[in-house]
Image (tube, coloured by chain):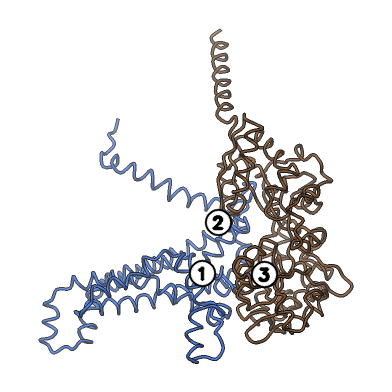
Amino acid sequence: MTRISPGLLFALPALIVLTMLVAYPIMYTALLSVTDQQGNLVGLQNFQRVMQARTTPVAFYNTLVWVGGSVVLQVVLGTATAILLNEKFAGRAIVRSIAVIPWVIPGIVGALTWAWMFHTEFGIINYMLTAPGIVDEPVGWLVSRNTVMPAMIAINVWKLFPFVAIMVLAGLQAIPKDLYEAARVDGAGFWDEVWHVTLPQVRPVIVAVTLLLVIWALNHITTIFAITRGGPANSTLITPIQIFRLAFESVQFHQAAALSVMFFAATMVIVAVYIKVLSAKEEKSL
Amino acid sequence: MRIIGKGAALAAGVSMLALSATQLAAGTVTWWSPNFHAPRAAELVEQFHAEHPEITIEIEVTTSDGLPQRVLTAMQSGAAPDIIDVQHGWVAGYALNNLVIALDDIISDEDDFIPAALEYVRVDGQTYAMPFRVEGLAVIFNRGHFEEAGLDPDNPPETWDAFVEAAQALTGDGRYGFAITGGGEFGNTIFRSLPFVWMNGGNFISEDGTQAIVNQPEAVEAVKFYTDMLVEHGVSPASTLQNDGTANRRLFIAEAVSMYQAGQFDLASIAAENPDIELGVMKIPYPEGAETAAILGGWSFVIPTGARNPDDAKVFVEWMSRPENMGVYTDTFPARTSAMEMERFQDPALSVFGEMLPHTRPVPSHPAWVQIMQAYFDGVQRILIGEQDAQAAMDDAAEDIQALLDQH
């Protein structure tokens, strides 16, 4: 009789929970994607039907715009905020606290508030623009193809840039002071310090945060679903919402599973490429 | 001998298990009732308990937001309650997926029910729900605005042409004549635009469910009539694409809109929030020489296949379906004509809504109906956003719908 290693025994409860909560749903989704409602194997039929739908490529394109726009702006704005909050000035503690408010507001509350702020007739944004005469006509923020996705991205950036700021700020405070002193001895100005000392030092933090932001943006539903439900005319339909619609509105669990499997695969590829590229760079820079 | 002994012990064990199971289940019925029905539900359950002390009804209050998803998840997972209040339109989907049981044995006086209500919840000749609440939309209008615009509030427009003229006369100075919906949950727009298609002799899909006919002239003309309120005439607010029924009610309460389609449940909240508005109600306008129409809306009881106590649940549903109880429970109108005679339904403000009821129809039942509605709604939004005209948008919608029909 072979003895089971005690290490494995200790890990077993966690492994069982993980299997049940993570592996089982993934396997079950994969199974759903190749079967029909009676449980018969149907091969790739569900995948074919999903791919034929007019909305699938639209949603895919929208997802790219949504993720790209959100993540780039979140990182840039978050990092800039962190650098600003790292400087010493009067009232810094208060500003730091205020800055995190968007992040701690529940997503659905934020989304519904923004929906009313963006409303064409009642919205405070249009009121602030029309009252002093900046624009003549109220802007249809959420009813025109050109403005609705930027509006969604703006809300998402507002929601998550404080998270980036906090993470980067923690990274900033870990940078040894002598690096700045050395730079100043060499005659570096503020921008030289930011570019040559600060950013390289917080690079690992930004890399990790960006990966998280990409995953969160890919999985996001709350903001868009609460405000536009993917409309108007699918201009804010992203793939997670399409999956939700298929499964829970149209009751096409098998097609929804097929789309989930494809989405999962695409996400894995993006994450793998991201990690690969960055770790290669890391080695080069060492 | 040993074998027999084992068998007997097994049998005894099984019967004991069965006994304890029935004892556990006996008497308790879990009932999911939405928050707007719940106050009356509690009242009725008290009466029921007095008449049937052997059965205990436990009410679990649900909210309408996200209810279809919750009900579906509960039914699919097998952890369903014994009775659920659902909208008529959801029932066919449950029946086709074998998630609810047939209730034909407890429907006693079939002719007393509004035919469209029973038609809604029937699949292959079997009745899978007990309809208790029915309603149809009408057009609510601001009588004061009518007078200001020189229109007669006692003779509101009846035909499409007269209606457009009235809406144009009412529009101006930041005020809009007739608000349509183009946003929110797509059901809002289906309920408000599909009746126009019906009145004009069209539909989304053919009677036998094999052909998409939403791009036929009758349907396209009606869709154009609906969307032109924004696109051509500008009598619907600029925010149309983000407005659902609730948003339109807010605009009406703010007196930014003079007419909009609504159900009778809006009357109370308008009166409460802006008592200055003098309310009028008119039938939904129809094309010259045709008849008005509306979608029959409302709620039914279903008993899920996974219910633990279907027998007692049936006793309660049967009790609730009696005219005197149904008439108390419904928020709008009861599904039985005999219950309509009750005092509370004689309010003159409700008369036009009552007149709409005989013109209501159930929506077509098809396994892919939700996706069909989505395809149509996407088309309507493409028109409203100014991307396509009615014909082009409905041609695309018909193509999408045909693909869905061919899959079934």
Q: Is residue B18 left or right of residue A276?
A: right
Disc 1 + disc 2, Cβ < 8 Å: no
Quarter placement of the C terminus of chain B: bottom right
The amino acid marked with disc number 1 is Ile
Which residue in the rendered view is the most extreme toward the front?
B276
- Label 3, secondary structure: give it: helix
Q: Would you call the spot at circle 2 few (<14 residues within 10 Å), some (14-19), or many (20 or more)?
A: many
Determine the colour of chain B.
Answer: brown
Say which residue label 3 marks: B377
Q: What hue does chain A carry in this figure?
A: blue
**Which is in the foreground here, disc 3 or disc 2?**
3
Q: Secondary structure at mark 1?
A: helix
Q: Residue at x 75, y 58 (%)?
A: B347
Res A137 seen here: yes
- In 3D space, how far apart are the residues under numbered discs 3 and 1 (Cα atoms)? 18 Å
- Dot 2 falls on a residue whose secondary structure is helix
Closest to the camera, between mark 1 and mark 2, is 1
Q: Earlier in the sequence, mark 1 or mark 2?
A: 1
Tell me: A76 left or right of A245.
Answer: left
As displayed, is residue A285 above or below residue B349? below
- Displayed quadrant of residue A143: bottom right
> Can residue B398 be seen in this snapshot?
no
* Residue type (three-letter) at the residue carrying disc 2: Ala
- The image quadrant that residue B348 belongs to is bottom right
Tell me, yes or no, whether dots 3 and 2 are on the same chain: no
Q: What's the chain of the residue with tag 2? A: A
Q: Dot 2 corresponds to which residue?
A: A257
Which residue is tagged 1?
A224
